Amino acid sequence: MVSPPGTPTVVVMVTRIALTGLTSTMSLLSLLGPTIPLEWGPGPLTLDSLPRVTYVAHRGGAREVPENSMSGLMAAYVRGTADVLDFDTRMLRDGTPVVMHDPLLNRTTYLGGEVRKLSAGDWQGVRLRPKASLPGSWRSERPPTVARVLDLLGGRAVLMLEVKDPRSLARLASLIRSRGLTRSVIVHSNDPALARRTHRAGLLTGLWRSAEQLRGDRPSQWRSYVDVLDVDHKARDADLLRAVNSGIRRVWAHTVVKPDQRDRVLELGCDGVITDTPGRLAGVRGRAGR
């Protein structure tokens, strides 16, 4: 890999390591410097600091890195191709929140069975199975806990975590508050009632809706408690325009993978894209319609 002239040596080293997945996350962070969240120092990375057009790495950029993995999230952070890092959360039987999309282990790990039936001790034996179709070379690794992601990336990047288990909201809120990250972590779900609870807990609230749901939605009714409305890029123009004009400050579209998809939602007024391919879309960022 040939780097552009003037590229800092540390960035080159970290990028190479992140792309191959051949070192631990702690090694990556030792190259990046102190792990004190930037939110606690000058120039905090909070929701309010995001650019006008925001790019979100969905599950870390699931077509470019192992989804919901620490190495994948770290690679997305180091590459700088996204403004927000997104990941999914579930809760183990002992109340430990972990990073995992599916209710079952089968699709993304070498094991099977339900995530919710595992203990924190059991979680130590789980290993992710990287897709063969991913670019680069990735090794198997333990999926992280939510606490680990917050400790290593909290404040360094704006994070968006999706709550797959509503029972875990109180525990997630505690983890976020105790690290001073209430303006840096968006708590995301598909349920307006859970979004309201999230807002009442003093957290940033994200709400996603499918194209089918948007046909009957009236997003303006959520504007008092939703910070980010996440809409399906496959929705009809009229439904996207209703979301854009709802009074909700930020309207982002999922899950965008192609430039023409991105350009359409931006022209309609969305001010962010949630993408599995942040590297592909980062070169030409398009323009916002609003």
Image (cartoon, grey):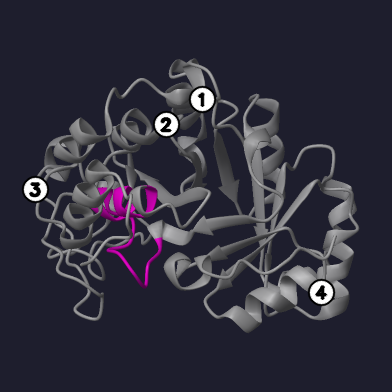
Do labels 2 and 1 touch, CB within 8 Å?
A: yes
Kind of residue indicated by mark 1: Leu
Q: Which residue is mark 4?
A: 215
Please tell me whether residue 122 belongs to the stretch shown in magenta.
no
Q: Which of the two labelled residues, at mark 2 and mark 1, occupies the earlier sequence position? A: 2
User: Which one is in front, 83 or 247?
Assistant: 83
Secondary structure of the residue carrying tag 4 is helix
Do labels 4 and 1 touch, CB within 8 Å?
A: no
Q: Label 2 vs label 1: CA separation?
A: 7 Å
Q: Which residue is mark 2?
A: 154
Q: Is residue 81 above or below residue 255?
A: above
Q: Which of the two labelled residues, at mark 2 and mark 4, occupies the earlier sequence position? A: 2
User: Which one is in front, 237 or 138?
Assistant: 138
Q: Tell me the residue at 51%/69% (across/down).
A: 283
Numbered circle sitting on residue 135: none
Q: Which of the two labelled residues, at mark 1 and mark 3, occupies the earlier sequence position? A: 3
In percent of width and height, residue 2 lies at: 23, 66
Q: Which of the two labelled residues, at mark 4 and mark 3, occupies the earlier sequence position? A: 3
Q: Which residue is mark 3?
A: 125
The answer, for residue 95, to whether it is visible in the render is: no
Please tell me whether residue 75 belongs to the stretch shown in magenta.
yes
